[in-house]
Image (spheres, rainbow, N blue to C red):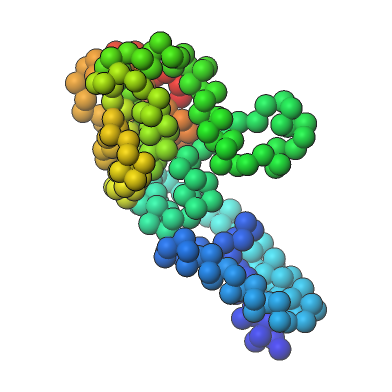
Amino acid sequence: MVQLLLAIAIALASTSVSGFVYVPYSKKLAALKFRQSFTLLSALPPTTIKSAAALTSLAALGLTVKKLNQGRIPYTPTSVASEYDAWTQDGILEYYWGEHIHLGYYNKEEMVKGYKKKNFIQAKYDFTEEMMKFGGLDDALKAQESLKVLDVGCGVGGTSRFIAKQLSGKDSLVTGITLSPNQVARANELAVEQKVSNVEFKVMNALEMNFPDNSFDVVWGCESGEHMPSKVSERMSGNGYSHPPLLS
């Protein structure tokens, strides 16, 4: 019985509290493994499941304490890129968070009703819309003949494509940069699928951009600055675009 409980605890420990399995395979396989785990558990007595859950909780607590005792994990030249490469290959973030790897927007009425009642994916689109309003990316600006937009830390390109679809100028272009080659590849795939042609993606370090001066009219940054070890850079403080960042 002890061996059985340990086996179940290990199986449970391989899932997150959100209910998906962290495995380096496709998102479909992750969901399948999750369903299989609960199919197995549903056949067990409730007391066995509760015991396994208790063991899992204790194990998780032990791992958490051990992790906290390790101290801060330092940045390396490849740490951010490698992590996002892995998450993009797994499909985990895209499966649960959609195209936009950032938080969502909830107005006062939605908060009163309960933010969990709002679709999480839709909240991200609303958040992007609110950022555009706040930053002054209005209809007049979007209608410029050759508006150039830079998305710093574009992820899989959700926001880049969202903005690009709203630009009406025939020579307008949105450029997204990220440290992750896998994100660039996925962003390009989605651009083709969605038939968005006025967007491009590049593997580039935001602190070491090589764009000529005055290349962009608008610079967009959303939840990417936390990944930059240096918050001040010559490239980010005047070179590479004609205006300071629109939003950051």
Residue found farthest to the top? 140
Q: Quadrant of residue 179?
A: top left
* Residue 232 image offset from top left, x and y in percent: 37, 24
User: Closer to the camera, 173 or 239?
Assistant: 173
Q: Quadrant of the N terminus?
A: bottom right
* Identity of the residue drawn at 25% across and 29% down: 209
The residue located at (38%, 34%) in the rendering is 161
Image check: 60 left or right of 77?
Answer: right
Above-or-below relation of 207 to 168? below
Residue 134 versus residue 75: which sits nearer the camera?
134
Vertical placement of 88 versus 101: above or below? below
> With 125 as the anchor, is 182 left or right in this view?
left
- Residue 62: which quarter of the image? bottom right
Image check: 50 left or right of 70? right
Whole-percent x, y for residue 127 in the image: 55, 29
Residue 223, given in percent of the width and then of the height, sits at 48, 33
- Residue at 38% of width from left, 38% of height from top? 157
Task: Name the residue rendered at 58%, 53% in the picture.
Answer: 68
Residue found farthest to the bottom: 1
Any part of residue 127 in sight = yes
Q: From the viewer's perspective, is residue 136 above or below residue 223?
A: above
Res 236 visible: no
Name the quadrant containing residue 166.
top left
